[in-house]
Image (cartoon, rainbow, N blue to C red):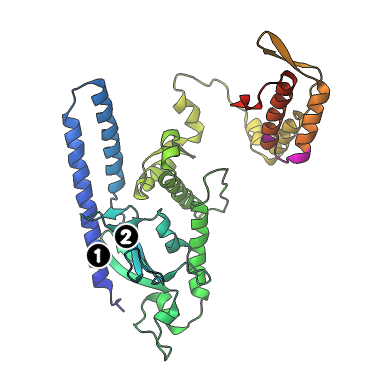
Amino acid sequence: MTHPEIESEQAYITRAHELLEDARVRATRLRSMVEVGRGGTRQALYERDVIEESVANRLAKLELGPSSLVFGRTDHLADDEADADGTAGGARTYYIGRVAVADEHQESVVVDWRARIAEPFFRASAREPLGLLRRRHFVTRGAKLLDVEDEIFALDEFFGEDDRPRFRAHGALYAAMAERRGTQMRDVVATIQADQDEIVRSPLPGVLVLQGGPGTGKTVVALHRAAYLLYTHRFPLAGQGVLVLGPNRLFLRYIERVLPSLGEVGAHLFVTADLFNDLFPDVRVRLADSTAAATTKGSEKMSQVLAAAVADRQRPLRGRLRVPFRASYLTLAPHQSREIVAAAQRRFRHHNAARRFVENSVFETLAAAQRLPAAGTG
């Protein structure tokens, strides 16, 4: 059965694609204008290069190819509080897509999937609806809307006093919800999305390891993670860059096509085996590990060897340490280093954390001996 709102939703999606095309045309014109001006001072040339790179990146993000722009919509419950202008807060609707699109008045038409306001689309569940009245999924092919499917969270808004839906059901998921007001089906769909989104939006610091069997979606989640980090932490990462390592060129070509469709083009792609040669083309590697050595280095036993090697280096000094300072020397005695190492081993489980503690303690000990300000670490 055709969804009653499919025509109006098709009109909205068509308009969003038209606005996206308008933005792409404007960016193309701007690039042509930049390419015309090739003369000028060094400052002017530098500024032109910066603008040209920015426009090129913008064009790459706007070029979705066969991918669909809009894939979902969220309807939020009406706010109880008044809006800033004093009027009553109303229900809010957001269309979620691959990139952000605005109209001629800079009003949002499509919200970038990585924006904070888009989180409920991925994370809402029956147990934690996150203020959603409804989550709507679009089945599209390019700009053509094929089907619409809803997940209802505030059921009282959609069911009348006779416990019948106020509008007719459609699709397998929605039909199941209209027939039975249980939450098992809805929980399954929402939980899968919520778990993936939790990984994608994890905090930036630290190491994130994603494990799973073949075909479980590790690559897809990792790509969304990279695109999310480049969007959310653009300023620190724009200068540092994002490195994507793959097992072969075929895999990287797939990554190269997918990342722009997620709204990002700023990643550097390398095959793991060729990373050294790609980074240092003038250096040639003449020796390689034997098969036995490579197998051992990649085994679990190697991690135990490395852990033992690290632990072996967590030891105090055997003799005095003399550090040149101005016209004399600063001295750290063995008994002082034993106290520092023992304190680090008591307080920390991980080597890197203990290492920072040891460095600070050594400086403080040397500074105290010569009455140096501890702020000298900076």
Say what secondary structure mark 1 lies in.
Answer: helix
Q: Are marks 2 and 1 in contact (CB under 8 Å)?
A: yes
Residue 229 percent location from the top left of the image:
45, 46
Residue 12's mark? Answer: 1
Q: Based on the displayed image, in which of its 4 quarters is residue 160 positioned?
A: bottom left
| Disc 2: which residue | 70
Residue at point 69% right, 25% down?
Answer: 363
Query: What residue span does the magenta drawing correspond to?
Result: 346-352
Residue at point 37% right, 80% down?
Answer: 169
* Residue 100 appears left or right of 281: left
Residue 147 percent location from the top left of the image:
32, 70
Residue 276 percent location from the top left of the image:
50, 27
Residue at point 48% right, 67% down?
Answer: 190
Q: Based on the displayed image, in which of its 4 quarters is residue 357 positioned?
A: top right
Q: Residues within 10 Å of mark 2 (few under 14, many from 20)?
A: many
Q: Amino acid at mark 2?
A: Val
Report if residue 249 is visible in the image.
Answer: no
Is residue 122 one of those drawn in magenta? no
